[in-house]
Image: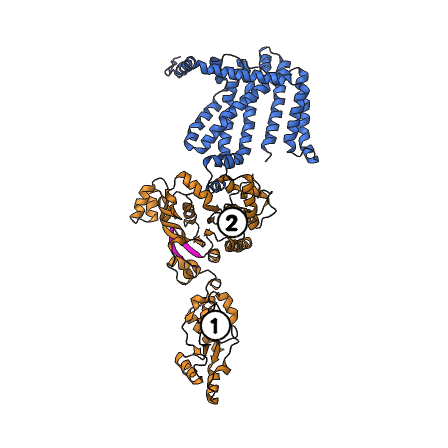
Chain colours: A orange, B blue
Amino acid sequence: MTDDRDIIIKAEGLTLIFGKRKKEALELLNRGYSKTDILKKTRCTIGVNKASFEIKKGEIFVIMGLSGSGKSSLIRCLNRLNEPTDGKVYFKDHNITRETNKQLLHTRRTEMSMVFQKFGLLPHRTILENAAFGLEIRGETREQREEKARIALKTVGLEGYEEQYPRELSGGMQQRVGLARALANDTDVLLMDEAFSALDPLIKSDMQDELLQIQNKLHKTIVFITHDLNEAMKVGDRIAIMKDGVIEQIGTAETILTSPATDYVEAFVERVDRKTIITAETLLFKHPTTVKLGKIGPKGVLHKMREAGLNVLPVVDNLDKFLGYVWLEDMIDLEKRKVQSIESALYSEVPSVLKSYTVEEMLPLITGHHYPLAVVDEEDGRLLGLVTQTSLIIESTRYSKTEMNELIDNANDL
Amino acid sequence: MQTIYSMEKIIPLGEYIERGINALETNFSFLWRAIDDGISWTVSFMNDFFLAIPFVVFLLVVATVAYYAKSRGRLFSREGLKRGVGLTLFVVFGFFLIYGMGYWKEAVQTITLVLVSTAIALLLGIPFGILSAKSNIADAIVKPVLDFMQTMPAFVYLIPAIFFFSVGNTPGVIATVIFSVPPAVRLTNLGIRNVPGDVVEAGRAFGANEKQILYKIQLPLAMPTILAGINQVILLALSMVVIASMVGAKGLGSLVYQGIQQNDIAKGFESGLGIVILAIVLDRITQAVANKK
């Protein structure tokens, strides 16, 4: 699917070892020794262990893990703030790991900019000068850099604060300056190292929204580090989950939730609020039994219902466009009255959803009804499949199927 | 009574050092001559320059500088006045007292010696401070040297200083520089090492080279500490100037020295008080500059 031109950063077997006897440690690592054994033998710590991944142009790639998982070390390998012990990092067409000092400075100045957890602002400079810092390092004239910095500050909503100093701003606003400084450089890639982790929850959520808005306008490639899974799920197009320096799984929020690759990932994602992440696409029951309007009479419908064991069926037209539902009772009634067309019994006042709807959005639509949700194509209204009420409730409550059945039984007893 | 230990010199270390210094003296005489000429010329030029300025003008300049530094730029506000008036009055009274006691010329000579020594000490000290902040190896070498310089009794420096430069202002300046340079090195080193790592890392991430990191990040952020170091250098230089008078350096220190030799309580006390006044003025002004940020 993805063609090579779409990939902007590619890491191959990236390994970072801290300590003095790196070579020895690397050899032991290659021979399959464990982290603790290597620490015992060489007093070296493995920061990143053979990480390989590809980052596509224009996506937000989240690297997520708990503290000590090596995520911050990993992101620093991308611009070589940490010198990788082994492995390669390709950026566009060049190999960053083999760049000379001069080339590396050029890459940092023009290709990647970075936002830090602790902001890293210069306290003796004004907000404007801070935002223009990267451009100053690059050697642009005062006029040029201040103009760009002003635009960047405006983008992050800090217009009017240009002449103030960092200490006069709140944490959230300081991080906006950090973001503006990175945006002012107008690099293709933005590295964000726990950029919102130091902010309080409300500000954090605001900043995430704002980042997504900015991303909608600017289409940067963003590598985003976080220890907060909900944040990862919210901002990330794809997520890499790290543990002990190893990347355990890479995928979209949904894939990671629905098919965790390892026990660790599974344990990790258990606490996530799935309602906001799982979409209709995942729960979709494809190729359901349908009724084509005009092609089939009540008798045929009854037959289909009996075969599928259902008392309600979706109705589509010739082009598979979703029209509504028909019910068992109505079909029996029509059959009795010898009516040949089912059109009069069609319920068309029913909701339908798109593939991208989340469980949270779908839940209100099922209350008070007894039919599944039809998932239709955004363009032509074609019926793609159904989402059953049971699956929705399972998703939102995380009850197992047996628990569900018990619940239903209990409800019936009452 | 019997001696139970030998009084003989087994290790004639002093002799070796003397021989080494002798060799330096004879082999590099051109260098010592050049240094002597440079320092003597600078000192006498500055002396003449300061003495050519009428006392009242000099007083006004120092008082203004004191007021400016203390009021932190808020020259004409009430707050500025409140902050600056104390030191300014002290400068006026203090300088009038020195003038009135008849020691103005010596006071100016002392100020000159302090300024020249401080300038040289900073010119040497700050680069070494930067070097030892940047390199742990340099730090490991510089530190014991500084310890040596600070703990060695100051008088000891006078002996080779005379040897190289005979008596006069130059050996005084040299001894003063050796005595007062350590805080410049130490506090520059400390200031740079204490710059938060995340700020330096941010600089690197944006592609700053070593020079840009030093000038745009480390030195500005280390400045308060470096200024505190400069303050220390000045005060140490002032305290050394008295000792330096033993090798012929002119100024208030030589008056104190004369007071001791002639058992002249009046002279000794007056000139000592003059030094105290200069010390307070220099200290408060440089401290005010250092605390500005």
Front-most of A323 and A276? A323
Front-most of A19 and B216? B216
Q: Position of residue A201 (x, y in %)?
A: 54, 54
Q: Main secondary structure of the magenta part?
A: strand
In the rendered structure, the answer to whether residue B85 lies left or right of residue A289 reads right
Magenta extent: A236-252
Q: Does A248 lie within the magenta span?
A: yes
Q: How many C-alpha atoms fall within 10 Å of the one at disc 2: few (<14), some, or many (≥20)?
A: some
The answer to whether residue B133 of the structure is visible from this angle is yes
- Disc 2 marks which amino acid? Ala
Q: How many C-alpha atoms fall within 10 Å of the one at disc 1: few (<14), some, or many (≥20)?
A: many
- Alpha carbon distance from label 1 to label 2: 41 Å
Front-most of A365 and B104? A365
Q: Position of residue A47 (x, y in %)?
A: 38, 46
Q: Residue furthest top?
A: B262
The answer to whether residue B196 of the structure is visible from this angle is no
Image height of A267 relative to A100, above or below: below
Q: Secondary structure at mark 1?
A: strand
**Nearest-to-viewer mark from 1 and 2:** 1
Residue marked by disc 1: A373
Residue marked by disc 2: A198
> Residue at image x 57%, y 50%?
A157
